[in-house]
Amino acid sequence: MSLKRIKNSILTDAKKEAERIVEDAKERLQEKVRDEKSKIEEGLKEKYTRLGKKLEEDKKRELIEQRTNYRMGLLGIKNNIIEEIFKKAEEKFISDEQYWRSMEKWLKDINDAGQILVNTRDSKRFNSEFINKNSKKDNLVLDKKNIDIKGGFILRTARFEIDHTLDTILSNLRIELAPLIARELFSE
């Protein structure tokens, strides 16, 4: 064999080997690209799934918050309506003669001596004459200082204090009647 042929044979074999190496590298590169593409697609699917779940959770949380806000708003409206009912009842009671009959009855029930305190509005009618006419005790005295109450009176004795104020009476009635009124008005 001649040197040229040997050289050509080596070059041909080297060329074939180089082509095979290049072809192998191409296949490995394509395989790596496929693997990376598959990993990226899988990662995107996972992110998409996580984002979908997060979006669903956010939607549920927002819906719960909206429902809570709606219920709180509705509860506020209902409470305002009930409060308005009590306010109108209070105004009607104070302006009615029944209020003064109640004051007379409360005075008649007093068995102890002491000072009586009333508000400025009632002090015109709730005077010494009114006390003497409606009480069993001679030593009930109207205090000259007026107190800040809606109506009724406070009796102070040496031993205790009796609260016959509308503030307290209405507060107790509100506790007792508010659930009944709510049930009657808003039963669904």
Image (cartoon, rainbow, N blue to C red):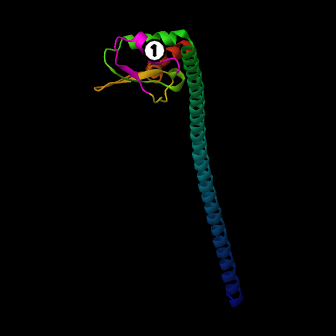
Q: Secondary structure at mark 1?
A: helix
> Along the line of sight, which residue is nearer the eye, 171 or 37?
171
**Front position in the image: 28 or 180:** 180
Q: Is residue 43 visible?
A: yes
Q: Is residue 154 above or below residue 9?
A: above
x and y percent of residue 131 in the render? 42, 15
Residue farthest along the bottom direction in this orientation:
3
Which residue is pictured at 68% across the width and 90% down the height?
Answer: 3
Question: Is disc 1 surrounded by few (<14), some (14 to 19) or many (20+) residues within 10 Å?
Answer: few
Residue at x 57% of width, y 15% of height: 95
Is residue 159 on the magenta stretch? no
Residues 22 and 17: in front is 22
Dividing the image into 4 quarters, which one contains the N terminus?
A: bottom right
Query: Which of 133 and 102 lies nearest the eye of the viewer?
Result: 133
Which picture quadrant has residue 132? top left
The stretch in magenta equals 124-143
x and y, in percent, of residue 110 in the image: 35, 14
> Residue 129 placed where, x, y %?
45, 14
Magenta-drawn stretch contains 137? yes
Quarter of the rendering occupied by the C terminus: top right
Query: Which residue matches tag 1?
Result: 129
On screen, residue 158 versus residue 68, left or right, reads: left
